[in-house]
Image (spheres, grey):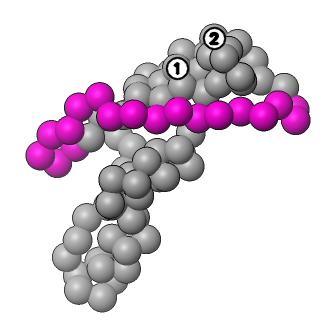
């Protein structure tokens, strides 16, 4: 799910490594951190399952973004997160 969040942010134009590099070289910058998560585990995944993580924005505010995610095995939803 972390990879899904990172990829979603990159597609929105926020490459986290570039943000970290900016902090190291310029001393000012920002990074995205997970402050809280709500998870609903609906069904188990099994070893060797091929899973998809679907991520979409719920709310974008000045200094925060709320994302929703689902972990799916085919059409079956295994985990919901916000």
Q: Is residue 37 above or below residue 63?
A: above
Dot 2 corresponds to which residue?
42
**Which of the 4 image quarters holds residue 82?**
top left
What crowding class fits label 2: few (fewer than 14 Cα within 10 Å), some (14-19), or many (20 or more)? Answer: few
The residue positioned 53% from the left and 44% from the top of the image is 4
Q: Are marks 2 and 1 in contact (CB under 8 Å)?
A: yes
Q: Position of residue 64 (x, y in %)?
A: 22, 43
Q: Mark 1 — residue?
A: 80
Frontmost residue, 43 versus 11? 11
- Whole-percent x and y of residue 8? 43, 48
Q: Is residue 15 left or right of residue 45?
A: left
Other residues around mark 1 within 10 Å, as few (<14) / some (14–19) / many (≥20): some
Residue at horizontal 56 percent and vertical 49 percent from the top: 3
Position above or below: 71 against 5: above
Q: Secondary structure at mark 1?
A: strand
Q: What separation in Å lies between label 2 and label 1 (alpha carbons)?
A: 8 Å
Q: Magenta span covers which residues?
A: 47-64
Count of numbered circles on the image: 2
For mark 2, give the secondary structure.
Answer: loop
């Amino acid at each position: 799910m972390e990879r899904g969040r990172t990829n979603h942010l990159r597609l929105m134009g926020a490459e986290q490594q570039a943000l970290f590099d900016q902090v190291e070289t310029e001393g000012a910058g920002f990074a995205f951190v997970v402050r809280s998560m709500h998870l609903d585990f609906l069904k188990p995944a099994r070893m060797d399952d091929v899973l998809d993580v679907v991520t979409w924005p719920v709310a974008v505010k000045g200094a925060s973004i709320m994302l929703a995610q689902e972990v799916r095995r085919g059409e079956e939803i295994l985990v919901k997160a916000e």
